[in-house]
Image (cartoon, helix red, strand yellow):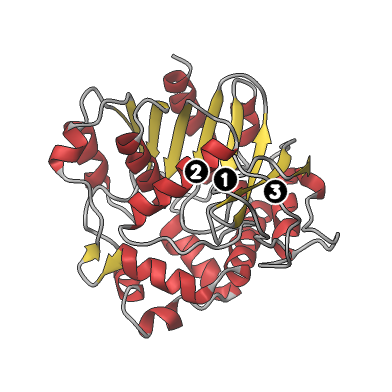
Amino acid sequence: MGAVAEPAAGRGGHGAGRHRGRFASLTTEGDAAAAAPPGGTTSPVAAAMRRLLALGGVEAKSRFAYVAGARLHYLEAGAGEPLVLLQGASGGAANWYRVLGPLAAHFRVLALDLPGFGLSDPLNVEAPLGAGGAEVVSAWLGAAAIERCALVGTSLGGLLALRLAQREPGRVRRLVLLDAVGLGRELPLLVRCAGLPGLGRLLLRPTRSGTAWLFRRLLTSDRSRLDAAHQAALIDYLWSSARAGDARGMARAVRRFADPGGQREVLTDAELEALRVPVLVVWGERDRFVPLAHALRAAARIPGAELRILAGVGHSPNWEAPEAFLAAALAFTRS
């Protein structure tokens, strides 16, 4: 691991700075409830993150590491064997606020803000998106000195987790796929249109009303267990993270992820059949973003895979049905 230089001003006050070598270890830490960028000014993203963590009763440390010149943020809580959480393509590590605390009662939990989300700097990840993202995650794990872990990935994070398990099966002790992408071409029309040049930039422009629509129409289905305070805090966090992000970089990433026909990067039957990592597939029955058929395909093709379908739940079981997700994930990851 390389030496660390002082951070320079960057995205939302979280500069990448300079470094020697590809990786660096922890550079900043503190109570996530007081997380702020260098210089002491609390960003809107940090404030929104604190609000979510408070709602979830989460006590976590806010940590930073350098990867390929970018300063990446992650939350850490608990002790013991490591369990890594990878978010989808919105928000950040605090997306796990309803399950992070209970998981930390059994594991050392590390939840990454993917590059360009939350408090992490952006990185230009080349196509294919999943393979490039997995390389970044692998580098971050090296920076955090995590040699082997249980891995949970949701949505885009599920694709990155799959690619990491392909790339480094010895590093992944157990893999949980939560409504993951990369298992079939089908996507909502809006997402397919967002992959078009020009139109994508317009559709991806963050607004609070647009974020609320996305949250209610695609990211969730059953919000009966999310009261008004939780919904408002989630929408504010998703919106704040999107506003702080690199709009052009996001448009490039979406074009690499989707085209008018759907997802560009889908694991083949042969790739799924070649996986040699224990896998649990957890899926919301009413997922409007990626259909249940993708889960059925994965469970049928991955050797020994287990499948848990959550009745009435949409794309985000970690928000909509945290108890059901925890029951399935803990029974699998603790075995």
Amino acid, disc 3: Val
Q: Secondary structure at mark 3?
A: loop
Q: Earlier in the sequence, mark 1 or mark 3?
A: 3
User: Which numbered disc, 1 or 2, marks the residue closer to the eye?
Assistant: 1
Label at residue 23? 1
Q: Residue at x 69, y 62 (%)?
A: 15
Q: Percent from the top left, x then y, of residue 26?
A: 69, 41
Disc 1 residue crowd, few under 14, some 14–19, many 20+, Cα 10 Å:
many
Front residue of 120/158: it is: 120
User: Which numbered disc, 3 or 2, marks the residue closer to the eye?
Assistant: 3
Label at residue 4? 3
Q: Residue at x 43, y 45 (%)?
A: 154
Q: Is residue 54 left or right of residue 272?
A: right
For the N terminus, give its image quadrant.
Answer: top right
Front residue of 98/9: it is: 9
In this rendering, does residue 188 appear at all?
no
Q: Is residue 202 above or below residue 249?
A: below
Instruction: Identify the residue position indicated by label 2 in the image.
Output: 139
Marks 1 and 3 sit apart, C-alpha to C-alpha, by 9 Å
